[in-house]
Image (cartoon, grey):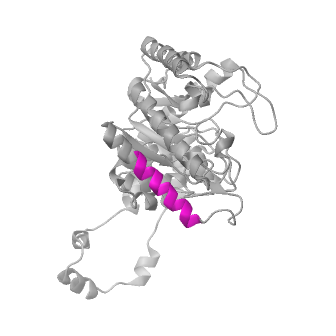
């Protein structure tokens, strides 16, 4: 019987900032004590996670001396070795310090843009030192409250210059590292540049080395804009650009809630897991979520276990979906195809165009075709509710 316990091959990861969240929000002070990075590594190992991800300053304070930095990193490496945990992904905090109040790579201040590049180079070095193969960019401050303050064309150009510079740095250092861009429509800025997966995909192909750059889409960020996250992930997969993924949950149209995976929109979570599993996605499944502000340490552990357990339960539901005779019979009916237009799969040719032009279509037959989508959706709901 499946006990839905996480195993290393599931590649479940959490950020230091996720289980390490102290329960602070814009209207309230922390509700639980901070954990050190070493303590977080041991906590994640205890609940069965595969790896831990980090911003540079999650591990090393922004004002640490080189000696302090080396001491902290050594202790962190020792904790990784003791637990068998890995660091698959790293990123840079370019949003917390007041220096970034008007952006990092898109700041109007050339000094800030230069410092952001320097900080990111050092953070990339740290990530590679810890074993990271993916480097994420979330531009939380890369936007505006008023478009009087920045020219969006300048902002896009500055972002492109930064990505090109950092890609060249990685290549020059000989690092085995790929970049993953993370879109978000708003918060903390009123408007964040390149707010969705589609925007980021278009931007990637304007870079000097688009082969190095992909996407890190997040459930909450697309849901904030009322978009279908599964469709966004499918677009990234189709482009070969799903380099990383952030899993959590989020009601449509709300602030960034970062709920436990599957905590709210279970049907959408099912379709997402189905897409990832059916597509053969073999990357990490990273949970970028926070426990409720009401949680104590033990409840934080339950939160982390819950993220992984829900994913595995939904993975089991995907297998049941594929094995359900009634569901598969409906799908066979819906996708019935006599093969008479298979020639179109070969693409355009003058012969194919002539053959298609000569075909007579009966619109009354096409319009009358039975599509039992209500039945199929109801069976899916019943499967998720555990009665099938």
Q: In this rendering, is residue 306 above or below 341?
A: above
In-front residue for pair 43/175: 175
In-front residue for pair 141/350: 141
Q: Quadrant of the N terminus?
A: top left
Q: Quadrant of residue 369?
A: bottom left
Residue at (33% x, 51% y) in the render: 211
Residue at (27% x, 68% y) in the render: 338
Query: Where residue 329 sits in the image (x, y, percent)?
Result: 39, 53
Residue at (24% x, 83% y) in the render: 353
Q: Is residue 164 magenta?
A: yes
Q: In this rendering, is residue 215 above or below 312?
A: below
Q: Is residue 207 magenta?
A: no
Residue at (45% x, 29% y) in the render: 126
In-front residue for pair 114/80: 114
Residue 231 visible in the snapshot: no
Query: Where residue 266 sits in the image (x, y, percent)?
Result: 59, 43
Residue 309 visible in the snapshot: yes
Query: Where residue 139 sits in the image (x, y, percent)?
Result: 57, 48
The extreme right residue here reads 27
Q: In the image, which residues are magenta?
A: 152-166
Q: In this rendering, is residue 95 above or below 40?
A: below
């Amino acid at each position: 019987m499946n006990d839905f316990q996480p195993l290393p091959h599931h590649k479940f990861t959490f950020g230091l900032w996720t289980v390490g969240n102290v329960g602070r929000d814009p209207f309230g002070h922390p509700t639980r004590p901070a954990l050190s990075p070493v303590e977080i590594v041991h906590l994640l190992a205890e609940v069965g996670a595969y790896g831990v991800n980090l911003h540079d300053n999650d591990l090393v304070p922004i004002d640490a001396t080189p000696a302090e930095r080396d001491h902290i990193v050594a202790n962190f490496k020792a904790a990784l070795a003791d637990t068998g945990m890995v660091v698959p992904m790293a990123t840079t905090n370019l949003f917390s310090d007041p220096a970034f109040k008007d952006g990092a790579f898109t700041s109007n201040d050339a000094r800030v843009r230069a410092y952001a590049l320097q900080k990111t180079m050092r953070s990339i070095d740290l990530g590679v030192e810890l074993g990271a193969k993916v480097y994420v960019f979330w531009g939380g401050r890369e936007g505006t409250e008023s478009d009087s303050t920045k020219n969006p064309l300048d902002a896009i150009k500055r972002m492109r210059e930064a990505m090109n510079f950092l890609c060249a740095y990685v290549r020059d250092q000989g690092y085995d590292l790929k970049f993953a861009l993370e879109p978000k429509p708003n918060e903390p800025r009123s408007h964040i540049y390149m707010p969705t997966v589609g925007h980021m995909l278009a931007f990637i192909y304007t870079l000097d080395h688009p082969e190095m750059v992909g996407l890190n889409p997040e459930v909450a960020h697309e849901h904030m804009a009322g978009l279908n996250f599964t469709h966004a992930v499918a677009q990234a997969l189709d482009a070969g650009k799903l380099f990383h993924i952030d899993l959590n949950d989020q009601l449509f149209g709300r602030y960034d809630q970062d709920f436990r995976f599957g905590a709210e929109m279970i049907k959408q979570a099912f379709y997402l897991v189905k897409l990832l599993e059916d597509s053969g996605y073999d990357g990490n499944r990273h949970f970028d979520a926070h426990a409720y502000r009401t949680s104590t340490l033990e409840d934080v552990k339950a939160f982390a276990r819950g993220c992984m357990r829900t994913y595995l339960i939904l993975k089991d539901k995907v297998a049941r979906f594929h094995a359900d005779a009634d569901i598969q019979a409906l799908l066979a009916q819906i996708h019935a195809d006599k093969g008479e237009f298979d020639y179109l799969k070969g693409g355009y040719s003058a012969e194919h165009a002539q053959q298609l032009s000569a075909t007579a279509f009966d619109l009354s037959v096409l319009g009358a075709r039975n599509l039992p989508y209500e039945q199929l959706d109801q069976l899916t709901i019943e499967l998720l509710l555990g009665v099938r």
